[in-house]
Image (spheres, rainbow, N blue to C red):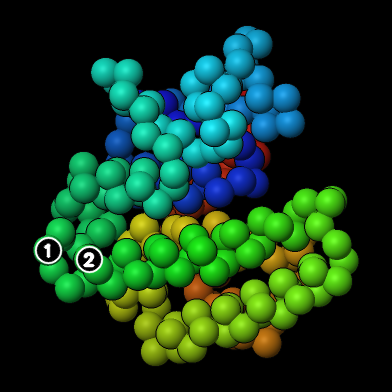
Amino acid sequence: MKLYYCPGACSLSPHIVLREAGLDFDLVRVDLATHTLPGGGDFMDINPKGYVPLLELDDGSRLSEGVAIVQYVADLKPESGLAPRFGTFERYRLIEWLTFINSEIHKGGGALFSKNTPEEYKASARKTLISRYGYVAAALEKNDFLLGSQFTVADAYLFTVSGWCPFLGIDLSALPSLVDFRNRVASRPAVRAALEAEARKD
């Protein structure tokens, strides 16, 4: 398998999940500004959407969209506990969290990175994001992870997008349960390995 990624992007989430699942994969770094690949290939030929993540399987099949990729990877290794079994209520709880993070946090935060976003909108968007993070923090006050005691793909996604907060002018210090969650996830060996791999320049 190959994971097409860009350091600091949402592709960190499936990167973490692949390592948590213990699967073999190669990393392919994408320059999102130019859509170029190592060696000069055009990423648009791989993914016409033009963004990461994208997972390419050994048979050449490709899967895009992080929420789909992380569930696919989790189901390759069900014994990992990265996702509850399909058909259980807990699986739909996982999908609920993934949807919330995707639509209410990821997309809301993404707009703040754009130089073309008006400042008045950014102020409103930050206020909304802080409210959304408050909801997440309340859920984490009694649990180590979003679904309880088990780390899942939703936690990898939340860790990824909440890591953008310092760059977006959002201070999470007033949400100690979320800060503790981030520290807890950051200490996981697979997470450390993913962060170290993406920090390398080679």
Identified at 32% across, 18% down, the residue is 60
Label disc, if present, on residue 38 of the rendered structure: none
| Secondary structure found at label 2 | helix
Q: In the picture provided, is 197 more to the left or to the right than 116? A: left
- Which quadrant is the C terminus positioned in? top right
Q: On the image, numbered disc 2 is attached to which residue?
A: 91
Query: Is there CB contact under 8 Å for labels 1 and 2?
Result: yes
- Residue 182 locus on image (x, y percent): 54, 69
Pick whichever, 142 or 154, lies toward us. Answer: 154
Q: Amino acid at mark 2?
A: Arg
- Residue 11 locus on image (x, y percent): 52, 44
| Secondary structure found at label 1 | loop
Q: Is residue 123 visible?
A: yes
Indicate whether 121 appears above or below 74.
Answer: below
Q: In the picture provided, is 153 more to the left or to the right than 136? A: left
- Residue 201 locus on image (x, y percent): 68, 29
Q: In the picture provided, is 196 more to the left or to the right than 87? A: right
Q: In the picture provided, is 37 more to the left or to the right than 143? A: right
Indicate whether 197 appears above or below 99.
Answer: above
Question: In which quarter of the view is residue 168 placed?
Answer: bottom right
Q: CA distance from mark 1 to mark 2?
A: 7 Å
- Residue 198 locus on image (x, y percent): 60, 39
Crowding around mark 2 (Cα neighbors within 10 Å: few <14, some 14 to 19, many 20+) is some
Indicate whether 63 appears above or below 46.
Answer: below
Identified at 25% across, 59% down, the residue is 83
